[in-house]
Amino acid sequence: MTLRQVKFGIIGTGAIAAVHARAIQQNPQAQLCWVYDENRERAEQFGASHHCRVATTLEELLVSDVEAVTIATPSGRHAEIVIPAARAGKHILCEKPLEVTVEKVDAMLRECDCAGVLFSAVFQSRFSRNVRRIRQAVAAGRFGRPVFGAAAMFWYRSPEYYAGATWRGTWELDGGGALMNQGIHTVDLLLHFNGNVVETTARATRRLHENIAVEDTIAALLRFENGSLGTLMISTACAPGFPRRIELVGTAGSVILEEDRLVRWSFARETPEDEEIRRDGIRGEGIIGGAADPGALSCEGHSRQIRDLTDAILNRSPLAIPGREGRRAVALITGCYTSAATGKTVFLGRDFT
């Protein structure tokens, strides 16, 4: 029996596009058919490497028979791709951040809703088994009253990394620095575990990358809607680069997640499954982000997210990560940037989602 395959196109051939291609090609119900990039030479090279057709214009790809597209252009150009793609009836998987302002994200969401297309935000870390375990423990009330939600990402990017693409390290196209580009996955997980943030006080600086317009280091104090406090410490100036770490602490339990490994799983009321979770969780699944080398990014999380989108298209199942989830992270990050720029606490409100 031949499986029905969803035909995909990739728009943009930046470094992450190759991960998208591998993720699509690993899914038996997905087929990579087209690629488009403004740089024709790069698009031709990508098409040859991944055995797909090359569109000469965005319009050519959008009138083709592809059902879904993945967006791998610079962040500040996502809206100008997503909006026409939605109007063309294509389902969309968009890289993080969805856009560099909340207003642009809202415009994308409106167009996708109006067109009736699926719109998913790339947050591949959520597909880790240990992330799901933490989320389930939160839903079950195992932490008691929330006390702290803390996240630290002490990564390293070389000066050559920022010099390697003119859009990196700019407000217009990158939307920010370490927090918006690399730290957004950490922000998303913290929100996924601990809920909305109602206020933030942040400070930002540059400790290594003096030639970029944005921060390479930022710290923020957070107050969550559930009453707990939290911190964000994000940097790309920390040699040699260390695993991302998220700590969730409550009156009845605590967990620590390093990349996708559970290094602490402790509750006041243990269940028979807890010891097995500790033994299995410490191994992780290799869904990692590249603390020192962006090229070390795992493909597994993207592959699971492509599978989620194809399932939603073929079976009309709900998306694991709808676009509105991507809006939350952008709202918090831009709030942190406003606080850092003004020196004042920013009140995000209970309805910042």
Image (spheres, rainbow, N blue to C red):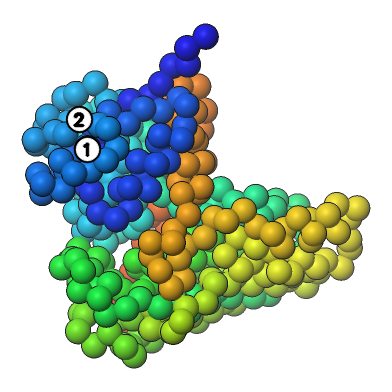
When asked about the image quadrant of residue 227, the answer is: bottom right
Instruction: Please identify the residue farthest to the top as the structure is shown.
Output: 1
Q: In the image, 336: left or right of 104? A: right
Instruction: Determine the CA span between mark 2 and mark 1.
Output: 6 Å
**Residue at the image position 53 percent from the left and 71 percent from the top:** 244
Q: Is residue 186 left or right of residue 59?
A: right
Please give the name of the residue rendered at 34% of the width and 90% of the height, measured from the top-left corner.
207
Residue 20, label in figure: none
SS category of the residue bearing label 2: strand
Would you say the residues marked 2 and 1 are in contact, meaning their CB atoms lie under 8 Å apart?
Answer: yes
Q: Which of marks 1 and 2 precedes in the sequence?
A: 1
Q: Which quarter of the picture shows residue 82? A: top left
- The residue closer to the viewer here, 102 or 166, is 166
Q: Residues within 10 Å of mark 2 (few under 14, many from 20)?
A: some
**Can you give x and y, in whole percent of width and height, for residue 54 in the image?**
16, 34
* Amino acid marked by disc 1: Gly
Mark seen at residue 53? 2
Crowd around label 1: few <14 · some 14–19 · many ≥20 (10 Å):
many
Identify the residue at horizontal 33%, vertical 25% (top origin). 7
Residue 166 location in percent, x, y?
15, 68
